[in-house]
Amino acid sequence: MRLAAITALYVALNATGVFLLRDAMSGSSGQRLSSALQPALLLGVLCYGLSFVTFVLTLRSYSLSLVFPLLSGAAYAAIAIGSWAFLDEPMPLLRVAGIVAIGTGIVLVQLT
């Protein structure tokens, strides 16, 4: 599988897992048992776990110095943008600049 496809798969699994976990844990203070049994939490853990498996399997074919910044940077950018778009979290200009810097770094790392 090509690295771009692996990155897309990892980001989709990772971001989906994080958003599901956030949804499951929102407003669950004091309700630990009931939140642990929520389908969103279980599916979030599954997605997040599969993203980890994707990361580990990617290390078989690519170097850690390429895989780690690529996958974690792309996932961070997707989660930050998704949080702004779907959760109404603020997106200050400085954060946008940081995401652009991360994107630039990802491109530069891939070129090596």
Image: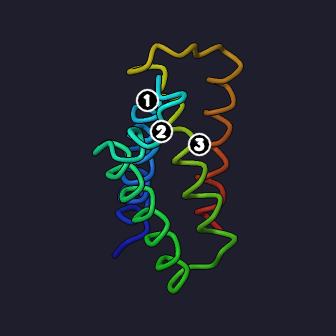
In terms of sequence position, does the residue under pointer 1 or pointer 3 come before the other? 1
Which residue is denoted by mark 2 in the rendering?
Answer: 78
Instruction: Name the quadrant containing residue 19.
Output: top left
* The C terminus - image quarter: bottom right
- Disc 3 residue type (three-letter): Gly
Residue occupying the point 69% across, 70% down: 65
In the rendering, which numbered label is found on residue 37?
A: none
| Callout 1: SS | helix
As measured in the structure, the alpha-carbon distance from the residue carrying label 1 to the one carrying label 2 is 6 Å
| Residue 16 shown left or right of residue 66 in the figure | left
Q: Residues within 10 Å of mark 3 (few under 14, many from 20)?
A: some
Picture mark count:
3
Whole-percent x, y for residue 21 in the image: 44, 41
Q: Residues within 10 Å of mark 1 (few under 14, many from 20)?
A: some
As measured in the structure, the alpha-carbon distance from the residue carrying label 1 to the one carrying label 3 is 16 Å
In terms of sequence position, does the residue under pointer 2 or pointer 3 come before the other? 2
| Callout 3: SS | helix
- Disc 2 residue type (three-letter): Ala
Residue at the bottom extreme, as displayed: 60
| Residue 80 shown left or right of residue 36 in the figure | right
Q: Is residue 107 above or below residue 111?
A: above
Which residue is denoted by mark 1 in the rendering?
Answer: 82
| Residue 98 shown left or right of residue 11 in the figure | right
